[in-house]
Image: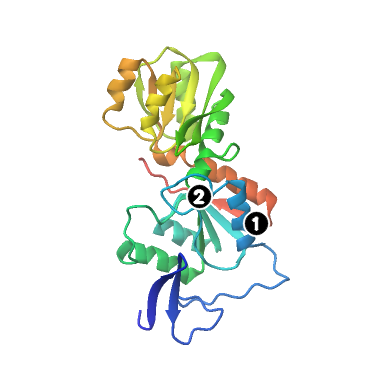
């Protein structure tokens, strides 16, 4: 990378390149300037819309929400996905997407701050291709319409939804009930079909399931919240060692339906909304993860 020196300026990665033209991509690929006659949507307009829709500035998170890596200024094709990775970046390039919208981005608390190794390879691939990376973590878990948990609760047929489970003072999950309780086996079958993954279950609740709480991802600690709320079953993405005995002693069903699997729903729903609201072609790319 002779002649290039990555630096951080104002929270955004800038790459200084000798004799670089104003519209050149820092990693070598040309980026055409936007013109008034182009269709698609302006990147900054789209990000501002998403920031407002998802209330991205509210509460604390483990990562920056919004635009993480800047690419082309005009977006015609948007790829949605759960997690940023090189396989996703390559597949997005293959379909000529100018932007990626994901739930799990690249920059996290506790991760290395240097652009070396895997992180350098990831970021440089995005910059070379001019692909924007847009990410929303907790805002996409908690949204009342397009969030992972609201969509899951609706798809499972729960009624009377109320916010459930909190992080830094903001609720991120939902709880609801079945007017007619479901047999336990039928409830598990619904979860299997929705998340497209065999759940890990600790079946210690009642045989008829009426009251259910959902917090996607790695939210097993909200099992305690579910117990306090008197729920029959609690759904999340992951389990840890202590969960089995706590569920057994409290008499509640615990379902670990997969971190990735429980977080497909929100970004897909949000992508569908954007396709209807903007001049965008939107495609979801699924890269399943059994965890």
Tell me if mark 1 has few (under 14), some (14-19) or many (20+) residues whose alpha carbon lies within 10 angstroms of its own. Answer: some
In-front residue for pair 229/247: 229
Q: Is residue 162 left or right of residue 12?
A: right
The quarter of the picture where residue 78 lies is: bottom right
- For the point 64% across and 50% down, the residue is 274
Residue at which label 1 appears: 280
Which is more foreground, mark 2 or mark 1?
Answer: 2
Tell me, yes or no, whether the two marked residues, 2 and 1, touch with CB atoms within 8 Å.
no
- For the point 39% across and 79% down, the residue is 4
Q: Is residue 43 left or right of residue 218?
A: right
In-front residue for pair 175/237: 175
> Residue 97, image x and y in percent?
55, 61
> Residue 110, image x and y in percent?
32, 53
> Which quadrant of the figure contains the N terminus?
bottom left
How far apart marks 2 and 1 lie (CA) works out to 19 Å
> Residue 97: in sight, yes or no?
no
> Residue 49, image x and y in percent?
63, 53
Element carrying mark 1 = loop
> Residue 196, image x and y in percent?
46, 35
> Which quadrant of the figure contains the C terminus?
top left
Residue at which label 2 appears: 136
Toward the bottom, the furthest residue is 19
């Amino acid at each position: 990378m002779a002649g290039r020196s990555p630096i951080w300026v104002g929270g955004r990665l800038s790459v200084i390149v000798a004799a670089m033209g104003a519209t050149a991509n820092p990693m070598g690929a040309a980026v055409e300037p936007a013109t008034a006659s182009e269709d698609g949507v302006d990147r900054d307009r789209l990000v501002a819309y998403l920031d407002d829709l998802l209330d991205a500035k509210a509460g604390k998170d483990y990562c920056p929400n919004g635009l993480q890596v800047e690419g082309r200024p005009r977006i015609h094709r948007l790829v949605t996905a759960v997690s940023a990775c090189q396989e996703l970046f390559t597949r997005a390039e293959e379909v000529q997407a100018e932007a990626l919208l994901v739930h799990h981005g690249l920059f996290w608390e506790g991760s290395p701050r240097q652009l070396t190794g895997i992180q350098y390879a990831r970021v440089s691939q995005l910059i070379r291709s001019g692909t924007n990376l847009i990410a929303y973590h907790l805002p996409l878990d908690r949204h009342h319409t397009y969030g992972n948990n609201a969509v899951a609760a609706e798809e499972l047929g729960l009624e009377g939804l109320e916010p459930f489970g909190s992080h830094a003072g903001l609720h991120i999950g939902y709880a609801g009930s079945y007017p007619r309780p479901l047999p336990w086996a039928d409830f598990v079958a619904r979860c299997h079909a929705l998340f497209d993954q065999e759940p890990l279950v600790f079946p210690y609740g009642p045989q008829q399931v009426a009251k259910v709480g959902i917090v996607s991802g790695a939210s097993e600690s909200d099992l305690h919240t579910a117990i306090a709320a008197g729920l029959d079953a609690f759904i999340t993405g992951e389990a840890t060692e202590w969960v089995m005995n706590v569920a057994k002693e409290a008499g509640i069903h615990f379902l670990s339906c997969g971190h990735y699997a429980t977080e497909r729903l929100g970004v897909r729903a949000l992508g569908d909304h954007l396709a209807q609201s903007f001049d965008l072609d939107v495609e979801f790319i699924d890269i399943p993860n059994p965890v």
